[in-house]
Image (tube, grey):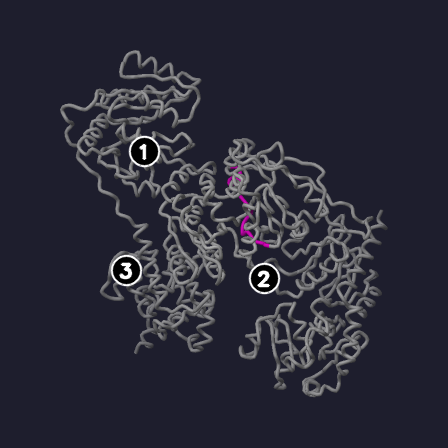
Amino acid sequence: MRADRRHQARLDDAAEVLVESGLVDVDYVGAQLGTTFDSVQEAARAAVLAGDVSTHPLFEAQWIGRRRSWQRLGQHPVLWYVSERRRRNRIAPHPLVDPRIVFAAYPEARHHPYGALSYWLSVATPGTPLPTRILPRKVSWGTYRAAAIEAAAQWREEVVLARPELVGPAPALPATLGTSPAVTVVMATQDAGPLVHRTVESLQAQSFADWHLVAVDRGSVDDTAAVLQGMAAFDDRITIVRESRCSHARALNVALEHSTAEHVAFLPLGREWLPDHLAALLAHAHHSGSAAVVAGPGGVARSRSELVGGRPVDLATGLLRRDAVKDVGGLDESLGGAAERDLLLRLTRDHEPLAVDVPVLKRPDPTPPGFGDDWRSVVLERQLVDWDAAAARRTDEGLVSHVMPLGPEPRRTVEWLGSVPREGAELILVGVRLRRAHHVLAASIAAVIAGARFVSVPAAVSTSAATNVGIAEAAGSTVLLVRPEAMPPRQPIAERLADVVRQDGVALAQPLVVDLDGVALSAGARFSADNPHPELFLSGLPTSDAVRIGQCEVAAPAAPLVALRTETAVALRGLSARFHSVLAETDLGLRARQAGHGTSVVVPDAVITSRTAYATAEELIGATSSLRSTVLGGAGTPPPDRAPELLRTAGLEVTDQRSRRVSADPEDRTAPAVLVPELVVRAIDGIHESPPRLRWAVDIAAPAAQRGDRWGDTYFARSLADALERRGQHVAIDRRDARERDSRDHDDVLLVLRGLDRVAPRPGLLNVEWIISHPDMIAPDEVAGFDLVYAASTSWSERVTREWGTTVRPLLQCTDTRWFHPDRAEPDTGPALLFVGNSRGVYRYAVRSALAIGADLTLHGNDWTEFVDRDQIASGGVANEEVGALYASAGIVLNDHHLDMRRDSFASNRLFDAAACGARILSDRIDGLEETFSGLVVPFDNEHELARLVKPPYEAFPDDATRREIAMRIIAEHSFDKRAERLVDDAVRALLARR
């Protein structure tokens, strides 16, 4: 009956579908809405009406659709999900639900009318492990459900707050007051003459007349002071104090020094009070005895929690007790802003303010957030972080704490949660006023991962202030400060950076930062002698230049991830909260050096990728303004610039320095802008050195980042680059996304390893193409554009040279003798029949043939599940450094080629690797096998031949001793070192011929 009802469910009734699909958790919906329900149907209806409410701990609408398809269609997200049919079976409705795992365990789930999650919930018990691979250990459904419900309840408690009630109406004023005047009104003025009359007249119109105005003029150059003096001449309740140019807080403190009344009020120029304003506030103050009375209508803060939460502060509609203001030291003159909020927070540390129902005229419009100093965050951080308590806490020397304020994208948070090392690390996620979906996901997943914690900040503070909240919570003796744009590293770097900051004299360490194209984005900050703004060191250069320079000292870090000792971070009071985000770590490094904690270093063998540019123009303009006060104020003087010396190590010399204008609007010359220094560099001419030294850009078709790490082109390029480096060359490997980098102009040779992509020659360089695969994609005009052309086939090279009229030299593929040689393993101690390679989206000839004859095949590689059963796959891949041991130990190694490579006799790299190990190799037929491999490679033309050849004792192949001799010849003639020697000799000859 239940199955029948499912099929009859109306897809236009979201609540009915929710109930029928089992995607309603009554307790979870209730936790988000702060209520309870008597039935599933009631909870479903409430969730649909509420809008942004998740109906189930394992279904999150914000996760399943980046383009919010259901919103365009006007659907509830559950309706959209269940109506997607086939596509739905590939959609993960939650980061902890992987449909592939569900289908592997329950194949019948593919046909469930409401998808994989609905089926899984129907068979799961509280003890069933979640269907996910991102968690470091198995977590039961019941455990996660409890964590999700608790996280939802905490979110509601923190975000959905009832506002304090206003006190009113005003009581009667006492017949006698403690002082006369009863209220001192303080005012700071500067260059605002037209506003003086109207503002003071609103004070003079008050029904309560026993007041004294102290107006402090901050060195006005207009008629402000004169207008005030004119009004004071006719009203002895007005006192004018003349000051030189000073801060707003300083002026108000001067006014407070001249006050004598029991209470003080603040009246900024341009504001007006209703006639009964002072009388009502004063009556409430005397009746309650409160040190702070605030007129509470509107959105202003009414309580201390609302002050900390960041609600607006309007001191112009408050009344404070003068002795209380004096006791807390008045306004903080070190603050460049938000001094009024800071004063109220200090006044209300022990007592709540009294919010009263006193009407006010229009409040000022909120100041739009800018990119300059964030003083509001500075003030709020003082309430959120107890640095003294943090300094007293003991930390774990064996633990590295990652502190990461969360950005707006939940997927990035989950990526970091899934990357936490199982041992020796903790991840502290700091959420700042997150939306429901992000808050609940982060808090609930962190709750079930050992070593992960979620800390929620109730106030909207800067990324820097949020980071400091996390630092104060860190249990490790080393902290990694991570900004949201940093991607989890492809290789663990935490312990490497921790080792560096444990060294004497080192305060901060940063990894090499690369962009999404794999090009260096930052190796720290450098400063010129005449410019307080930093330049990103090595920005735009290939990462190989940073590696060549090695670990080195820099003026300060400039990276979305930096490491330092926790005690250093606490001693420096963390990042300066006035920085919104970028350059806060630069400021920290400069202050650390100035305070004697040590220098900053860049560690180029630790690499982090940034999803974005280091900063937008607006962010950089604001941050450099903040940093300028550190540099020029002496809090962090940069050390002498070592960039020219370091660049010479990379084969580059500095020829000049210029300033680059960064503008918020390049089309508007009046828009905010900043000048940042920029070194002008060129390559050092090394062709006449001994041996000749050239800069090479090796171009491959593999994509950047982890997507391309497993490509054969990547392994090939790395081995070739290493061989060229051993011959004294400077080599950068440019993957597909990096081939347009401007710094290629510094290179001498562009070497294109021709694979899937056609690459245009670079003007001014020696352009070399080595065609190693896919000959069908090569056209005559392509090879004609290169200075030197090689191909990994002797017969094809001869033919196209003859037909196209362009010289194409034969240069066969080769092997890396560090990893491939006969001593990697004993023969015949490994798999009987071996294939190592990815499917490339096709059922490859060698694998298909081996399985067709029932051979005992050991298969390593990716993307095979579409063609073979999962239990027939030994692994998803083997590290290139370990493949040689498999080849040397195997009974037989299988090989095949692309159709065009087979036809045109392009011998694959696998043949050379396996032959260098002395392996027996069975391959599809190409010309030249016997000449090159001397019997180590035997071709097969059909399955019958394969079945005969794979049977021991392998009579078609030479004996062990002979195979070893052949392997040593392969190593001598077909190594990457041999190919590098040929390439360097030819390139030097060609370049010299140009001169």
First in sequence: mark 1 vs mark 2: 1
Residue placed under numbered mark 2 in the picture: 707
Residue placed under numbered mark 3 in the picture: 30
Q: Nearer the viewer, residue 928 or 350?
A: 350
Q: CA distance from mark 1 to mark 2?
A: 53 Å
Choose top left, top right, bottom left or bottom right for residue 938: bottom right
Choose top left, top right, bottom left or bottom right for residue 188: top left
- Per the image, label 3 sits on a secondary structure element best described as helix
Residue density around tag 2, few if under 14, some if 14–19, many if 20 or more, within 10 Å:
few
**In the drawing, what numbered circle is on residue 303?**
none
Task: Based on the picture, tell me whether residue 609 belongs to the magenta stretch.
Answer: yes
Q: Nearer the viewer, residue 129 or 764?
A: 129
The magenta region covers 606-621
* Residue 310 image offset from top left, x and y in percent: 35, 41
Tell me if 311 is positioned left or right of 607 in this view. left
**In the drawing, what numbered circle is on residue 314?**
1
* Residue 207 image offset from top left, x and y in percent: 20, 23
Q: Nearer the viewer, residue 163 or 37?
A: 163
